[in-house]
Structures are given as C-alpha cells and as structure tokens.
Amino acid sequence: MRIPLFSWLFLILIYYVSLSVHVFVVSSQCPSDDQQSLLLQLKNSLKFDSTSSKKLVKWNNGSDYCYWEGVSCKDGCVSHLDLSSESISGGLANSSALFDLRHIENLNLAYNNFNNTQIPSKFDKLTNLSYLNLSNAGFVGQIPIEISLLKRLVTLDLSTFYYPGTPSLQLENPNLNVLIGNLSELIELHLDGVNISAHGAQWCQAISSSLPKLRVLSLSSSNISGPFDSSLLKLQSLSVIRIENNNLSTQVPEFFSNFKNLISLRLSSSGLYGTFPEKIFQVPTLQTIDLSGNSQLQGSLPEFPKNASLQSLVLNGANFSGQLLPNSIGNLKMLSKIDVPSCNFTGSIPRSMENLTQLIYVDLSMNKFNGSVPFFSMAKNLTQINLSSNLLTGQINSYHWENLTNLVFLDLRYNLLNGTIPPSLFSLSLLQKLQLSNNQFSGQLLEFATISVLDTLDLSSNKLEGPIPMSIFNLRELLILSLSSNNFSGSFPLNGLPQLKNLSSLDLSYNSLSITYDDTISSYSSFPQITTLKLASSRLRIFPNFLRKQSKLSTLDLSQNQISGGIPNWIWKLSTLSQLNLSCNSLVTLEGPLLNVTSSLSVLDLHSNQLKGQIPLFSQLSVYLDYSRNNFNSSIRTDIGDFLSNTIFFSLSSNKFQGIIPESICNATNLQVLDVSNNSLSGLIPKCLTAISGTLAVLNLRRNNLSGTVPDKFPEHCSLKTLDLNGNQIGGQFPKSLANCTMLEVLNLGNNQIADTFPCLLKNISTLRVLVLRSNKFYGGFGCPKPHGNWTMLQIVDIALNKFSGEIRGKCLRTWKAMMGDDDDAMSELNHLQFTGVYYQDAITVTNKGLEMEFVKILTVFTSIDISSNNFSGSIPKEVGQLKSLYVLNLSSNAFTGAIPTSLSKLRQLESLDLSNNKLGGEIPAELAKLTFLSFLNLSNNQLVGKIPSTAQLSTFSAASFTGNKGLCGIQLNITCNNPSESPDAVQKAPNHHREINWGVISVEIGFTFGFGIAIGSLVLCKRWSKWYYKAMYNILLKIFPQLEERIGIHRRHVHINQRWKR
C-alpha cells in the first residue's frame, strides 16, 4: 500500500516533536551523578567537627543523596540544604561547590562558626533562592551586594549575636536601602546584630518603600536610632516587630495600633520614653508585647476587652508608677506569661487573675502590691510564681497550692506575710525552689512529706521557732538551705549532713540553735562538698574537723560563737576558700607554721577576738581585711603595702600596734577604707598617704600618738569622704589642698594642736555633714566673708575649746539647711551615716548633756552645734532659732552678752541647751517652756535677772541649771521673789531695821491658822462637804487650765545611744 507523501511528512513531524519533548524533559532534570558529586565536594571542602556533626558526617556514596540528612530534592535537583548547627568552622569560599547547586531554593547555614570570615560574594549564582538563613554563623564584615540580586527571596536572615567590642556584620556599602531595594517579595527580614547605623527616617522609609509584603521585621541590636517614621504604615501586613536593644531615644507612636495584623511587638531596652499608647495594648490580634528595660517609659494598662488575644505581657523595668493592674486583666483568657517586675505598680493584685487558666509564668516582683496573695489554683500548668519584694500581707494556706502540681519555682521573699508555713508546699512533686525569706512567718516548721525534689529552701529572716524538722535531711536533692535569722531552737547535728549528698550552701546563722558535731561518728569523706557554710551565732565551741577535707569550700562564717584557743593551720590551706569570718569569738592564737602558706582568701574578718602577735598576710588577692579589736601588739610590718595591692578595706583599729605607719601602705592603690585608729602609733603621717587619689574614701587615724603636720598633698581629684585624725598630737596649719576633696562628708581634726584660722576654703564642699575642730589652737572669727549656701547638709559642728573670737554672724547659719527641718521632718528618715562602697560606719564623740558620748553610728537626723570654750562676744544671733531640727546647742564659756533670744523657743527638737558661763542678761524667756523635749539646761554663771518661769518644763530643772545669776529668783533656787518685778538684789538692798515684834502681823497669822484648821477639819469630818469641795475645785481648775482635760500623760521621745563616760 502506498502512503501519500503528505502522510510521511506528518509522521516525520510527529516524531520530531516527540523527540524534542523527550530531549527537553531529560535536559530539565539534574544528572544524579552531578548533584551527588557537588554535595560530596562541598562536604570535603568544609571544615567541621565530625564528633558533633549529625548531617555531613553521614553523607557518602552508598545512598541516595536526596535522602541524606539536611538534603531535599525536586525532580532530582537539590532544592533544600540545611547544614545548621553542624559545627562548621570554615571552607566556604567563592569557589565552593555550594554555588554550583543552582536549583537550591532553601539554604540554611545558621549556628555554625565560620571564624569571623566574610560572606562569600557568589550567592548571586543561586538565583532560585527564596529562603536564606546565615544567622549566627560567625560571618563578619560588609554584607556583599550580590545578595541584593536574589529577587525571589521571601525570607532573609543574617542576624547574629552582638557583643560590644567584637566584629559584626556591616551594612555600609551597600547600605540597607541598596540591600533590600530589589527584594520586593520579601516577607521576613532578620538583621539582628547587623550594624546598620541609620536614623529613623532612613531605615523606616527604606523598608516601607521596598518591602510591601513584609510581615516580620527584626532589627534588634542593629545600631539604629529613632524616631519611628509614619511611612511604616504602608506595611499593612506587618505582624511581627522586633526592635530591641537599640538606642532609639524616642516615644512609641500611636500609629502602631493601626497594624491590624500585629501579633508580636518587642521593643525592650531601646531607650523609649514618654507615655506608651494604651490603644496598642488593645489591638485584637496582639499576642506578645515586650517593653522591658525602658526605665523612662511611662504608662498604664487599659481596660482589656474580652476578645483579647494577649498571651505574653512583659513590662520588666518600665515605669508604671502609681498605676494599678486593671481588674480587666482577667479578660485575657489566653495569657500564659505576665512579667512585670520593677514597674512601680501599686494596689492589690486583682482577684480576676485567679480565673486565668493558661498561666505558666507569673512575675510581679519588686512592685508595691499590697493585700493578700491571690489563688492561682485554676492555672494548673503554672510553673513559676515570683511575688517577691512587695507589701503583701496575710497568710498562705494549703489550698493556695494544692492544685499547682506543675509548680517549679515559688518566690515570696521580702513581703509582710505571716502565719505558719503550710507543710503541703513540700508535697508539690515538681517544686525545686521555695523562697519565703524576709517575711513574718511564725510558729513551728512541722515535719513534712519527703517526696519533694526541692533543691533550694530559703526561710531566712522570719520568726519561725521550735526545732528544725528532721525531715529536712530527707530532701536528698537539696542544694541550698538557708534558715538564718529566725528563732529556731534545740540542736542541729552537723553529723546529719552526709544524708544531703548534693548540699552546696548551708546557712543556720542567728538563731537560738546549738550546733553539735561529733568527730567520731562520721568520716570526713561522707560529708557533701559544701561551697558556703554560715553558722554565725550558733553556740559553736569548736572548729568542725570535717571542714579540713572540704575541697570546694569558698565561704565560711563561724562568727559570734564560743570558739576559743587557736585558729587551726589547716584552715589556711583550703585552696578554694575565698571568704572567712571568724570575728567575735575568743580566739587567742594562730597555729603555725604560717610561712609558705598559700591562700586565695579575698575576705578575712578576725575582728573582736583576743589574737596577738603579727597579723597573718598570705596573698595579694585579699580585698577585705579586718583585724580590729584584738590584742595585736607588734609594729606594722614595713612591707605591708605589698600585700594590699587589691585590698579595698583594711582595718587594724583598736589593737596595740606601735611604731610608725610604713610608707609602703601607699602601695595599696585600690584602698577605699584605711582604719588604724585606737592604737599607739607614733611618728609622722606618710606624705604619700594623703596623695592617694581616685579610690581612698575613708582615712581614720584617730586616737594615736601621731605628730608633725597633716601632709598638704590631697590630690586634685580627691575621693575622700571621711578624714578622722582626732586625738593625736598633730600641729601646723590646716592643709589648704583639702579643698580638693569635694566629696568630703566627715572631717574630724579634734584634740590636736593645729593653729590656723577658720577653714573657709571648705565652704564649697556641699557634701560636708560633720565638722569637728574641737580642742585645737584655731583663732580669729567664725564663718566666712561670703557664704555661698553650700553647707546644706551640715549636721554636726564642734569647734569648742579653741581661741575663736568676735561675733557670730547670723547669715553664716542661714545656709545650714540640714538643721532647718520642720518638727515633722526630723524623724522622717532614720539612717546612719556610712560609706556605702564597703560596710563602714563613721563614729564620733559629742559632748551632750554635760557628758562625752561616743556615737558609734551617726544618725543622719542627729544635729549638734558646740562652740563652747572660745572667746565669742556680742549677742546670740536670732537666726539660731531657724535651726528647727537641732538636738544639741552648746554656747557655754564664751563672752556672749545681751538677752537670751526668744527665737530659741522654735527649736522644738532641742534636748540639750548650755548657755552657761557667759555674760547674758535680762530675764529668762517664758517661751523656753515650749521646748518640751528639753532634758538638759544650763544657764548658770551669767547675769540673768528676774523670776525663773515656773512652767512645767522649766520647773523640772535643778538649781545647778541657774546658779551664778545673782539677779534670779524662783522655786528652782529656793529664793522667793517678793515682787515679780523685784529681784533678790533689790531685797538685799532694803534697809535693815532693828528687830521688834509686830503684833499686827502675828494676829493675822493666828487668825489665818485658826480659820484654815476649821476648814480642813470640816472637809475631813464631813463626807458630803468634802465631795462638794473637790468637785468645785476641779471645775475651777478646768476653767483656768482647759488643757488638763486632754493631757492625761506626756508622750516623750527618747534617743538611745552608747555612752562613754569621760574619765
């Protein structure tokens, strides 16, 4: 059969087309040998840790490459490559086989370490990439411009952990605008830790104009600044905004509430300020908001709608001062995390929170919440509750916790909770940390079930009493046990500690316990390796010998016990021991030998023992050394400073040290406190000692035998806060360079031989609180020509026993603002004056009420002026009456004239007033009766006249307060004033007639006596008359003195101090 030519041509065309289609399909697929070869080349070129690798290490020829770990294929072509977390450390160059895998759509190299190399520039060859993740892979330097050519990218993640001072990724050339200019398909952009260096308008407009489909924007730690530009509103698909740890220094715009798809808003630690818009909290889709770390950001929580989606609320450290948690927080049914510590919230915790069943994490700590602890029993998945550092009251009962079977962490420290601690807390099977310290829990701690996995138990600083339950020893997972500062009694056997194999910290200090230990019962090796052991005030009599085998012990506190004898030598050989407190015992000796003993002690406190000989010095690592109140009686070793290169606190006070202060002490360039007071040191003050700059805050050399002058070497940037040289033999002039110490608070140069005028050079030191120049040779006028009002904090002035002269100018007193507080303010802040760098409290001796009193702690509210025993003249300035919070005023033994100013009656806090031995005249002001706190008064040896006011207050003082005033009369002196206007002097000058009987006077006296006897007899013998008489007299007195009805008793305030009587 013949086939037409047309048919042959048609068949040939069909064959050609089918052949072409076959060739096209085959050519579009990837040769398997080629793909596998490229993957193996990539593996061989990369440097990775085969022991940590879970993907690359399994790639080999014997299996299908499309099923290798981290590899996915489409039509035989590698489309997905995930080599994240493979411990890759290098081998990715521009020539890498990776860039020949042209069909890759998804590439993940995150969480590797390419050792601070740059990102290769050949990424533009991977034109099919839609997902690129190079995050936290160790890349640094400029991001290559070739990435901007990947137009199909949907997700770009170049984020990295940023640490200040370390290399990071940069976006300079290209900048952000160039990098994302062609990436219009981008949905997610992660550039955390990339140094973008752009201000608000730049980065906001670059993103909003180039990325219309963007849903996720993450630019944390990217060195961007504010403000937020309104162009961001173009990104209506935006659902996640993460811009944390930047210095935006801007307010949060309200237009953020217009992002209708917003799910997550994280703006923590970004320097935000102003008021946060409430509307943002009310975005219906919002699930997560984090504003933490913005201390200048203010705001309040709104009324939450019932359809709110919020799951995580984090406001840690934002300032919501004075605001309440709204009761509508109970509408957030999906809320799983509320983290609002340090936000200054007030009021009670809303009871509506008890209905939040999805809660997992609750932190309301460090606010001002009051009221009771809410019930969270419906939140059965709750794992953490932190309500510490609030003002919560009431009890916590068993039913608070019974249903919280997933609770892991409970912290109620620093509140006002009371009642007993329910044993059911110890039955929560997953509870690991229970912290209830610094409350008012009382009663006994009962025995409890021991199914607990508790690793931290802190019940310190409460009022718990009775014995410590022995079930404590069944908490086998226990790491930290703190029961200090309670009223626990009975004994606690240290030999029970081997049962707590994991114990690392034990604190039983400050109870009424008797700690017992028997060296023969337990072997040293059976005890757990403890890092912290505190047994202060525990009636301990010996050093527990098991300690000698503690290889991890770092802190040991055995202070305030009854340990006597010697400090064992093995204690210095504990290689890890860094803090040792053996103070307040009866220790006498240091067991030797001490030579060649190496120790890593940084804190050593041996004060208040009976130790003698040389002080032990072991290393240059010591930071805190206290050898005070012992019997060390040698000289200070000449190389002492070589051991103090890192020391900040060094005290040798109240010992028997002799000799000089060695100049090597100046090698201790980090010293903040140096106290060698109350010894027998002699010689000169080393010139270099006052020249130590930058760190020295307290220099106390008081009560020694030092001579010479104060070295005038105080540096320009002097950091001294306390300088105490009292009780030496120092002469010369006042050091002029002391004016450089602009932070000085306490200056005590008393009881020396310094001869100079008043130190006006200190007038610009606004921090000065205590000025003592007592018993020196100062002369001239008091005060400065032009006071500038800078002594606003001055509270104690003692310049007694000098040679000051002239008048006291009232304007000098007007600048002493600390002494001018109102009556109600005087006790408003009861603190002790102390240096806060390390624990150190200033002490001072004050003449008060005629006695020398040593204030071992200076109350910041205590105020005193003593200018006695000088040559001041003129009148007492009326401005003294403005010093309303003054406690002690001593102007005695001067040459003051004129009247006692009535303005002194304004000193309502005054307890001691001494104006004796002056030339004051006139009458005693009746207004002094207003000084209701006055308990010491001395007006003796003046020229006062008239009747002493017979008020209730002044009538309590004896004659000694008024003697030596020839013109005074009154019941206090047992001198009758015949005429209110007639003084005793006038009576004495009356003519002395001869003695004769005046019968007229006698008859009057007889008549008076007879009538008085009849009246008294009638009142005694007639009961009805006596009742009538007393009732009438009571009514008359009430009309004359109506205040008697109110004043049933006098409420007096007392100040308790430690007194040292002058001998």
Image (tube, rainbow, N blue to C red):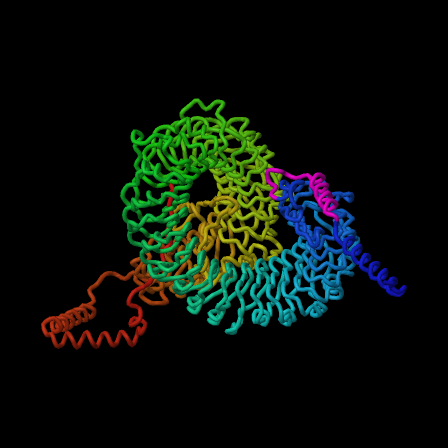
Q: Is residue 814 visible?
A: yes
Q: Is residue 629 left or right of residue 66?
A: left
Q: Position of residue 225 (x, y in %)?
A: 70, 59
For this orientation, the residue located farthest to the right is 5
Residue 189 falls in image quadrant: bottom right
Residue 118 percent location from the top left of the image: 74, 45
Residue 908 lies in magenta, yes or no? no
- Relative to 245, residue 746 above or below: above
Residue farthest toward the front in the current orientation of the protein: 1
**Residue 916's x, y, as percent?**
42, 53
* Nearer to the camera, 192 or 960: 192
Magenta segment range?
Answer: 31-54
Q: Position of residue 605 (x, y in %)?
A: 44, 36
Q: Quadrant of the C terminus?
A: top left
Give whichever of 911, 982 is nearer the camera: 911
Q: Residue furthest left?
A: 1021
Q: What quarter of the picture does the N terminus occupy?
A: bottom right
The answer to whether residue 201 is visible is: no
Looking at the image, residue 217 lies above or below residue 259: above
Q: Is residue 576 left or right of residue 850?
A: right
In front: 413, or 528? Answer: 528
Mark count: 0
